[in-house]
Amino acid sequence: MPTEAQRDALEVVLVTPRNPLNIGAAARAMANFGFRRLKVVAPFAPTWREARSAVGAEELLQNAQSTECLAEAVADATLVVGTGTLTYRRPEQKVVLLPLLAPLVSQELARGGRVALVFGPEKHGLTREDLSYCQVMVEIPTDARQPSMNLGQAVAVCLYELAAGEGRGINQKTPGGAEPLAYTEADRAAAASGRLDLVAGVIEETMRAAGYSPKTMQAANRHDLRLTLRRLTLSEHDTRRILGLFRRILWRLKHIPVGDDKPD
Amino acid sequence: MPTEAQRDALEVVLVTPRNPLNIGAAARAMANFGFRRLKVVAPFAPTWREARSAVGAEELLQNAQSTECLAEAVADATLVVGTGTLTYRRPEQKVVLLPLLAPLVSQELARGGRVALVFGPEKHGLTREDLSYCQVMVEIPTDARQPSMNLGQAVAVCLYELAAGEGRGINQKTPGGAEPLAYTEADRAAAASGRLDLVAGVIEETMRAAGYSPKTMQAANRHDLRLTLRRLTLSEHDTRRILGLFRRILWRLKHIPVGDDKPD
């Protein structure tokens, strides 16, 4: 997970997007993953106006810059990464699969570099000319039958990978501060083994009272029950609920007149 | 990377999406990452019509099913995963960060299970009620200042992770080194969501028959029961045992003479 300052050294560059909604979608994904610097290359004037005046267009869009050409947009970047699929092109530069991009970008940011992540227009993506400004082309591993992604979704997937990718092997905190594998409160206080035995006892008694467990099966059922209760990792709260229910059932069963113990 | 057959055992479920473009965007992301089965819960009729008749709407959208409720959509799933942010909710089930989801889903698919990946409506996401059908909630690690993702982008990011995540080679283990939510042998055949609903129904009936669940508490008890049954990751074998026991108890309780329903 890059630091705040490092994220500000990463720019998302959209080359001539046609649809203002896609500029908004790119901006939203950037905000979702904590990136702030957006440049748009040679936007159509109405598209650009509409995107920036959209309801909910935030600071990020207000601060977005437009440039005349890609060369200008990436002029101060030390690592320029083009995005796309290999289906329709034979790239002339190094290709990196998206899941392997994060270490590359992190390294560049960590040593004080500036990274530009470049996305082509909706229809055909980056041209060979565009790609000639990129040191690296990153490929999003898509299905060969439908390789071409929606622009806003491609931006989201790439930024997700850059934000989360580095942390995968590491014990990392989420932005909210939660543990990666958080458990709810109810889970936390696991029931002690003795409490599970108490539960097992009450269930066993209920089985007998209901005529569910024939005498020959009782040892096997007890064993299964003990195993099952452990496997389910019941919380203390669960055990209280189960005890309450089964005690109630037991009380009711014991008020059944003697002799009435066979179904049908 | 799941196999073709395994991907077909994964369903994307959209709960009441408002915007037809988002259904289309979800479908496109599915095609990009090689998934094909889409269900939409209680769609608004015009939304649903518009989405399916969209230009370029492919086989995937034509084959998409709509269901009346979430329970129906996930009835045959053995692992139901809800998506969302923790910013506005305190989940009652296990939470897994998205980068750690792939091994969990792969494991379930590899042993022949069926997975449902559930996305809430655009405005507020999944409700507490929706989430009570989910064993696991997956959190996309977004920035705390803008945690809420666009629906189509959230689908893209999740499916990207599921398609590519396994290939990284570094995310097989959770940070602690333990298997994420490891399953034992006895768990192998996880109970489908619809079977858990059946168990919940029988237990609820028993609660009523035993006078355990006062009328004012029944909705809350039903909700708790649904959550608990999911959290315990019951196997099909467990559900058969529980159904058998509770049906027997019910039979016995119903043979109690009328009027004798108060303890002491």
Image (cartoon, coloured by chain):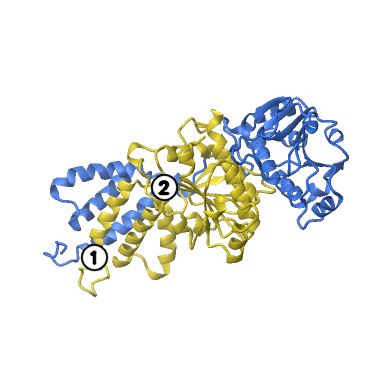
Chain colours: A blue, B yellow
Examine the rendering and report whether any part of residue A27 can be seen: yes
Q: Position of residue A236 (x, y in %)?
A: 39, 48
Residue at mark 1 shares a chain with residue at mark 2: yes
Task: Note whether residue A178 is visible.
Answer: no
Q: Amino acid at mark 2?
A: Thr
Instruction: Look at the numbered disc 2 and give the secondary structure of its residue.
Output: loop
10 Å crowding of disc 2: few (<14), some (14-19), many (20+): many
Does residue B171 appear to the left or right of A255 in the view shown? right
Between residue B133 and residue A186, name the one nearer to us: B133
Q: Secondary structure at mark 1?
A: helix
Q: Mark 1 near mark 2, Cβ–Cβ under 8 Å?
A: no
Image: B241 above or below B264: above
The image quarter in which residue A146 lies? top right
> Residue at 76% of width from left, 50% of height from top?
A19
- The picture quadrant where one finds residue B158 is top right
Which is nearer the eye, A32 or B18? B18
The tag on residue B253 is 1
- Residue that label 2 marks: B78
Question: Where residue B178 sits in the image (x, y, percent)?
Answer: 46, 32
Between circles 1 and 2, the one closer to the viewer is 2
Which one is in front, A180 or B150? B150
Q: Amino acid at mark 1?
A: Leu
Residue furthest toward the left?
A259
Residue in front for this viewpoint, A191 or A63? A63
Instruction: Name the residue located 41 percent from the left edge and 61 percent from the top edge.
Output: B222
Seen in the picture, residue A129 relative to A203 is either above or below; the reply is: above
